Amino acid sequence: VVYEQEGVFIHSSCGKNDDQDSLIAGILRVIEKENEVVVDWRPLDETLDTSNILCAGKDSSSVVEWTQTPKEKCSQGADRPSSYEAEWDMVTTVSFKKKPHSNGDATTHANRESKWSFLFSLTDLKSIKQNKKGMGWSYLVFCLKDDVKLPALHFHHGDSKPLIKCLEKHVALNESPHDERVLLVKTQKSLSQSFENLFDEPSYGLLQKWKKDPYVVTMGKFSKVTNYIVGSLRSSDQSNQRRPPSEMADFFNDTIPGLKINQQEEPGFEVITRINLGKQPEVSRREPVSAEEWAKNMDSEGRILDVDYIKRLIFKGGLCHTLRKEAWKFLLGYFPWNSTKEERANLQKRKTDEYFRMKLQWKSVSEEQEKRNSRLRDYRSLIEKDVNRTDRTNKFYEGEDNPGLILLHDILMTYCMYDFDLGYVQGMSDLLSPVLYVMENEVDAFWCFVSYMDQMHQNFEEQMQGMKTQLIQLSHLLRLLDSGFCSYLESQDSGYLYFCFRWLLIRFKREFSFQDILRLWEVMWTELPCQNFHLLLCCAILESEKQQIMDKHYGFNEILKHINELSMKIDVEYILCKAEAISMQMMNCKELPQTVSEILGIENSSVTPDSDTGEDESGAELSCPTSLYQSISTPVIAANGTRDGAQQAAETQSLTPA
């Protein structure tokens, strides 16, 4: 309980102040819970009746049903359309559903009081209306997002200022331009217990919590990651709506030590020399690799004949769904590319035994043992919470007691035994979900997930080294691609690219539809056409939105809102083409900065005046890693399964650096 005030009355019969029964005395509390903050008012000495409690559905907001009059009644819940974001940021919310109230004489005083009790989450608060100064008792009226107005609360013992001050620690409140009595909740600072005041200067305790365990804090309501930063970096003081870049740099260096991204003091000043990358080439994609194409590239013992060739096909078109169960095992490194069918069968037998030995470790822990193992207990609690809200709109995971959910839970618990130091961090369930969906097998899904986590491990480590590195690398790439756009973002306090955080953390899992993520991930797993291709995907998305952001002069808030609302609206094939075109553009650059060359794994052939030029008669030569484009002239299989010369020429042109 962070706030408590007695003597807060509801006037149930307005205009009859001499009727004492019309004044219902109560206690108002603000309560911090694990994932949220709630406001609770109830009559004095009322005992909480659990029959009043109504839990929100998994894809809904909090439910408030007020039964004073039919006009004021508002019900939300199971009928509310589910949203993709809701299942991610769902918080276990509780509110009161009022008991039907009888007007008969037998109605007890307690029941009359009970019908007025209410409780709501601050995530559902829309506005607060206050009375004018000097107009009798101080009172407040809470209005929720569904335009439900709760009864006015009259503060007979003191005023409402301490309450407002308390609420401002958790939500940003601004005076309405239309009515000075109304305080509006800024939607950009959507609250969960994990996020409130994350960068609020006085809240050093929470800042330390962020430093200590950023992922538990961040993933508490991760889909709102862009929103909480808005409120946190914006002072509630209207006279101080903009902070200097140097101060913002200090904030991010405090919270993410080592995050060194240049913030220019003057937007028009270019730190690096502009480099002309030339025009982006036109890039096309092909049809997904078919089962026939896959089989043709395998010998009689089940070996892949030409690994580079098959990777290029997957990069250019992805896989048909029937192939994914087998091909993903190779792409993720569970199966060696040069293994035979017999060797893979033996590997699966060994891995099955190993998996169930680890699973037995946590399955055999008794309740008494678990009471003395806080880490395992915490891992289990987080996993159970996340599993129940991961991809529940997907048929593979929908409904209660779904076997897919059980497998999701068991694999994540077993991973804690596999890597107990890392254990479970919120967000991992989203990486596992598509893998399990494709594999439809507990053991295979586990080992593929292990391989994927080997790639993603640094993203979830306590020091956030993986995230720091990627944000810095993305900044370098975007500055080379469009330094003017970078300067604009910096001028709007957005140069840290923190709105890309969730893209990087879980590899765009929340930005694309489930089926598009399957395509995107398998393309990225080919590791073509260069290192860190996912960073070029970020560049492609940002470059696609650059014109709208700059033409409409989006500021800090608008940029965050715009990027956040791109979720589920991005064309995966278009972005893959654009990212590939950017990679070719950079590979063709004769003066590629050394830093960028290292990020993309490109051997830079630009030379200094006193070195051997290494040029032929046609000019400077760009040296690409041989593993990326060797045997590039290998014919590409046409969509009909034949080797087509024209198709080969077109594919070769789009794959080979000019």
Image (tube, rainbow, N blue to C red):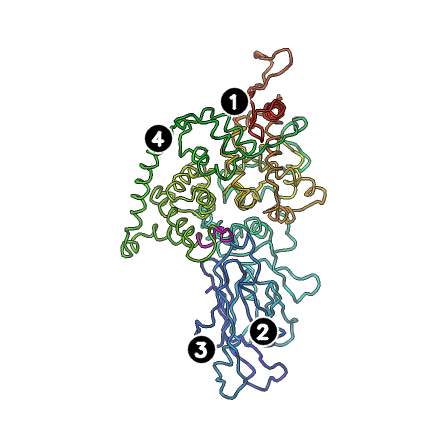
**SS at circle 3:** loop
Residue type at mark 2? Answer: Pro
In this view, the residue in front, 403 or 101, is 403
Label 4, label 3: how far apart the Cα atoms are: 73 Å
Left/right placement of residue 418 relative to residue 429 reads left
For discs 3 and 1, the disc positioned in front in the rendered view? 1
Q: Which residue is mark 3?
A: 45
Residue under numbered circle 1:
625
Give the numbered dot on residue 110: none
Label 3 environment density (alpha carbons within 10 Å; few <14, some 14–19, many ≥20):
few
- Rounded to the nearest whole Å, what is the CA distance between mark 3 and mark 1? 75 Å
Please state the extent of the stretch shown in magenta in the rendering: 387-395
Front: mark 1 or 4: 4
Q: Amino acid at mark 4?
A: Glu
Distance between the alpha carbons at the discs numbered 1 and 2: 69 Å
Between discs 3 and 1, the one toward the N terminus:
3
Mark with earlier residue (3, 2): 3
Q: Earlier in the sequence, mark 2 or mark 4?
A: 2
Q: Are marks 3 and 1 in contact (CB under 8 Å)?
A: no
> Residue tagged by mark 4?
342
Q: Answer few, some or many: residues within 10 Å of disc 4's Cα (few below 14, many 20 plus, some between 14 and 19).
A: few
